[in-house]
Image: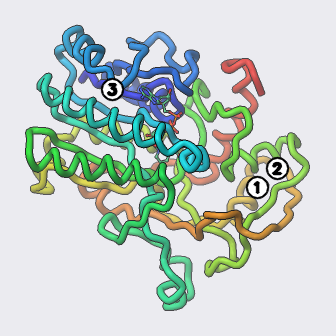
Amino acid sequence: MKILVTGGAGYLGSITAKALEVAGHVPVVLDSLLTGPQAFVRERIFYEGDIGDRELVRRIVEEHPDLDATIHMAARIVVPESVEKPYEYYRDNVSRSLELFDQLLHLGKPRVVFSSSASLYAIKDAAQAASSTSNERFEVREDDPLEPTSPYARTKRMIEEVLEDMALATDLRAIMLRYFNPIGSDPDLESGIYAKEPTHVIGQLVMAARGHQPSFTITGTDHPTSDGTGIRDYLHVWDLARAHVRAVERFDQVIEAVGEPSVVVNLGRGEGVTVRELIRAVERVSGRSIRVTEAPPRPGDAVGAFANVDRAGALLDWRTELSLDQAIASALAWSDKRHEILGYE
Ligand SMILES: NC(=O)c1ccc[n+]([C@@H]2O[C@H](COP(=O)([O-])OP(=O)(O)OC[C@H]3O[C@@H](n4cnc5c(N)ncnc54)[C@H](O)[C@@H]3O)[C@@H](O)[C@H]2O)c1
């Protein structure tokens, strides 16, 4: 198959492009290089430009009339920045996606796989949380209530709604994948996190384990979880990339099976891991001990959630194959290797 991958120079896009190649398919990358590094494009078919550039999308389809589907990953993705720059986030993520979808439809390319996010789910309130004592209560299913709390997350929900409505009214068909917390690199350590100062928990832990920062600070220790720290569902990015291969390979089958023109599917390991559990896992895998300090939650810090993955199993015949420890080992290995590819630590 030949697959258009928007955002294919980014972290997840470049690894998904590689998983497509490994499965014998041909990715065609469209990326503006707004954030994704040129080094992640490699020798792939590449168009530098914006998803909202209808003429460019037309040219891509004219030059690749055999495109079977689009994996739409291009987006601005930084939550605090989305609070400061709502215009840029709604323009790039929502308006330009709208132009992309309409143009794809117009050009007879109706299959879209969309990168959505677990950050759409409503946080379980105190009453729900108190109704059970285990971390199991933080599991979320695709039909659970949504409550996106940042402009970034709202753009993701809006695009889901756009796809749902366009799919009802037109030939467009959509598989919307809600990612939980992908970590690590591809098997050959060619792509990974490229932020100079990673702010997310695994990036911070990797820096602490490598001695690049003196300690790791847990923000929030009073959450209603088993140990008081936030809960997430970390999955190996290679498993996530493989799920996209399944989604494009089985696209029509999936849409037929659900009997609807669009569907949402959670992608996670289906296991909740608290921050303290993650710290222990990083210590175990790295063989280093990490000095930990504790602080109150930052504004907007949420207790978190983990994925119910029944639908991914049933529709995509997919589940994660790699363990948490393998994902952490991959993240550590990438952090040792990345200066060779990116030119910075
Ligand atoms: N990384 C995560 O943990 C995570 C979790 C949930 C969802 N997602 C979603 O997955 C997708 C990929 O995320 P990522 O972590 O690889 O991010 P990333 O920033 O590494 O990749 C996004 C890519 O899109 C490109 N881009 C941005 N705006 C563009 C535009 N208008 N036209 C063309 N290209 C544009 C950027 O240059 C970049 O290469 C995003 O849609 C993101 O919202 C990511």
Q: Cβ–Cβ below 8 Å for labels 1 and 3?
A: no
Q: Pick the residue in front: 41 or 99.
A: 99
The kind of residue on which mark 2 rests is Gly
Corner quadrant of residue 290 = bottom right
- To which residue does mark 3 refer? 52
Between 1 and 145, the residue placed more toward the observer is 145
Q: Residue at x 34, y 32 (%)?
A: 96
C-alpha separation, residue under disc 1 versus residue under disc 3: 45 Å
- Looking at the rendered structure, the kind of residue marked 1 is Arg
* Mark 2 → mark 3, Cα distance in angstroms: 47 Å
Secondary structure of residue under mark 2: loop
Task: From the image, state whether disc 2 or disc 3 is nearer to you.
Answer: 3
Counting from the top left corner in percent of width and height, residue 46 is at 40, 13
Amino acid on which the number 3 mark rests in the picture: Gly
The residue identified by callout 1 is: 284
**Quadrant showing the N terminus:** top left
